[in-house]
Image: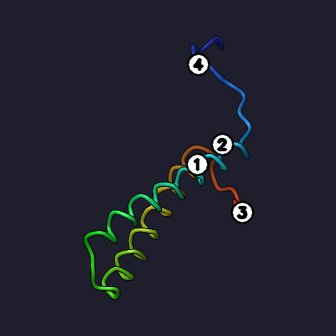
Amino acid sequence: MTDDGKIFQEVDVTTVLREIWTKNKVLHAKVLSELEKHITDPEEFKKVRAYVLDEQNDYTRSIIRLIFGDIEMSF
């Protein structure tokens, strides 16, 4: 513990980012699989799929940006 009462733990940023993106991909798969059961029109599913993927990725990137700041990620 530091003098100001904060606790710091060393983390491997690369490992954390890889884990976050892995969980993000699993979330994509689960959500899209469930949506596919309920949306039978291929064109509508395509639009919803694009929207869901974009929004989930934006959300994940915003969390990473809040925690780590602006960093380049490529996995």
Mark 1 vs 4, N-terminal side: 4
The spot of residue 51 in percent (x, y) is 39, 74
Q: CA distance from mark 1 to mark 4?
A: 24 Å
Q: Nearer the viewer, residue 34 or 49?
A: 34
- Which amino acid is tagged 3? Ser
- Determine whether the residue tagged by mark 2 lies in a helix, strand or loop: helix
Q: Nearer the viewer, mark 4 or mark 3?
A: 3
- Which amino acid is tagged 4? Lys
The reply, left or right, for residue 61 in relation to residue 69 is left
Q: CA distance from mark 3 to mark 2?
A: 13 Å
Q: Nearer the viewer, residue 52 or 60?
A: 52
Q: Which residue is mark 3?
A: 74
Mark 3 vs 2, N-terminal side: 2
Mark 2 vs 4, N-terminal side: 4
Against 3, residue 62 (above or below) is below
Q: Which residue is mark 1?
A: 20
Q: Residues within 10 Å of mark 2 (few under 14, many from 20)?
A: few
Q: Which residue is mark 2?
A: 16
Q: Which residue is mark 4?
A: 6
The spot of residue 28 in percent (x, y) is 46, 61
Against 24, residue 68 (above or below) is above
The reply, left or right, for residue 45 in relation to residue 29 is left
Q: CA distance from mark 4 to mark 3?
A: 31 Å
- Which amino acid is tagged 1? Ile
- Determine whether the residue tagged by mark 3 lies in a helix, strand or loop: loop
Mark 1 vs 3, N-terminal side: 1
